[in-house]
Image (cartoon, rainbow, N blue to C red):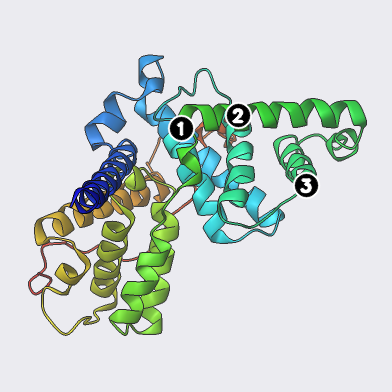
């Protein structure tokens, strides 16, 4: 009887430990999700005097840089997206004022290759990154192959990798992306190819924004399918509220889609050319705008529609 009691207590002990570990994991995961107000007003960069437009430009800059670097290294879009999320998370713990985004982005891609089991040699990452950063210098591609320059830049990237891991307490290696839940949702709903293509394009775009810091991957994936279906005038699912099957409430779905429409509208306004004005004097020669006013990566263009259209919900 004593042995039976011991086995029962032992089983209860392991069940309690398992529940505690699951709770801790959930707690650690929740640390990487923030409200829009926290992102816009309370980021470390904001405390160091970097305003929201400037931080948004820096975010767009490292995402564009990662896209170029990833394509040059021939890594998958999933790995590139993983690196973008790593950068987004890092800059919710550290300031842009104290951490060079090119170094952090390069280290993030190197880490993302490890996290996604897509090995990429450090030497290739170092050389490709250096050539992109100093693309204005014709001698950069020669200089990076010199021993002293190569080792110096390599040490900078490795220092960035250590900082990334220390900042995240090694949780950056466990990044969940919307790609898997999106693929599962599209297969389950038997989505048409055009709808699937639109949804995939949207997800590529969302990873360049803070949406992945606000909502979990399955929520983003479900809302993306709904948004793509709206733009394609397509019907998905066998029931009107099909999104409930994926653990997303109607209230949450409306909230996420509203955020998505706002992101698309903001980008559309940035992409619009300035209005022409009739002037009574000679117009001076057009001057090339400074680098910090450069427009970020544009979203895929879809016609704007009201999210309160009849029949959507």
Q: Residues within 10 Å of mark 1 (few under 14, many from 20)?
A: some
| Position above or below: 281 against 300 | above
Circle 3: element type:
helix
For marks 3 and 1 on the same chain, the one whose residue lies earlier in the sequence: 3
Mark 2 closeness class: few <14, some 14–19, many ≥20 residues within 10 Å: few
Callout in the foreground (3, 1): 1
Residue drawn at the location 35% of the way across and 25% of the way down: 43
Q: Is residue 230 visible?
A: yes
Q: Nearer the viewer, residue 24 or 289?
A: 24
* Marks 2 and 3, the one that precedes in the sequence: 3
Q: Are marks 2 and 3 in contact (CB under 8 Å)?
A: no
Picture quadrant where residue 139 is located: top right
Query: For mark 3, does the 10 Å Cα neighbourhood hold few (<14), some (14 to 19), or many (20 or more) residues?
Result: few
Q: Which residue is depicted at the point 14% across and 57% down? A: 254
What percent of the width, then of the height, locates residue 313? Answer: 9, 69
Residue 105 image point, x, y percent: 58, 38
56 horizontally vs 309: left or right: right
Q: Residue placed at 33% from the left, 47% from the top?
A: 211
* Residue wearing tag 1: 168
Camera-side mark, 2 or 3: 2
In the drawing, does residue 17 fall left or right of residue 206? left
Q: Secondary structure at mark 2?
A: helix
- Label disc, if present, on residue 28 of the rendered structure: none
Going from the N terminus, do you reach mark 2 or mark 1 first?
A: 2
Look at mark 2 in the image and give the residue it sits on: 162
| SS type, badge 1 | helix
Image coords of residue 59 (percent x, y): 46, 37
The CA span between labels 2 and 3 is 19 Å
Q: What residue did someone put label 3 on? A: 124
Residue 295 visible: no
- In space, the residues marked 2 and 1 are separated at their CA atoms by 10 Å
């Amino acid at each position: 009887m004593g042995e039976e009691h011991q086995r029962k207590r032992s089983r209860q002990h392991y069940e309690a430990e398992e529940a505690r570990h699951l709770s801790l994991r959930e707690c650690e995961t929740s640390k990487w999700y923030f409200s829009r107000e926290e992102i816009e007003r309370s980021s470390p960069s904001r405390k160091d005097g970097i305003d929201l437009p400037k931080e948004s430009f820096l975010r767009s800059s490292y995402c564009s840089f990662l896209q170029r670097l990833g394509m040059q290294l021939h890594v998958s879009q999933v790995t590139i997206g993983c690196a973008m999320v790593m950068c987004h998370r890092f800059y919710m713990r550290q300031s842009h004022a104290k951490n060079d985004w090119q170094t952090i982005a390069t280290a993030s891609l190197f880490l993302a290759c490890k996290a996604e089991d897509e090995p990429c040699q450090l030497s290739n990452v170092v050389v490709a990154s250096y050539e992109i950063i100093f693309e204005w210098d014709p001698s950069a591609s020669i200089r990076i192959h010199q021993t002293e320059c190569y080792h110096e830049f390599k040490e900078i990237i490795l220092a960035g990798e250590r900082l990334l891991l220390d900042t995240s307490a090694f949780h950056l290696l466990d990044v969940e992306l919307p790609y898997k839940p999106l693929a599962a949702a599209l297969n389950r709903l038997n989505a048409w190819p055009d709808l699937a293509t639109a949804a995939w394009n949207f997800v590529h775009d969302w990873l360049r924004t803070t949406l992945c810091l606000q909502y979990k991957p399955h929520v983003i994936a479900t809302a993306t399918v709904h948004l793509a279906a709206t733009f394609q005038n397509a019907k998905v699912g066998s029931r009107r509220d099909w999104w409930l099957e994926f653990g997303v409430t109607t209230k949450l779905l409306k909230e996420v889609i509203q955020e998505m429409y706002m992101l698309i509208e903001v980008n559309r306004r940035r992409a619009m050319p300035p209005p022409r004005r009739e002037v009574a004097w000679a117009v001076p020669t057009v001057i090339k705008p400074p680098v910090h006013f450069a427009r970020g990566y544009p979203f895929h263009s879809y016609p704007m529609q009201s999210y309160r259209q009849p029949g959507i919900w």
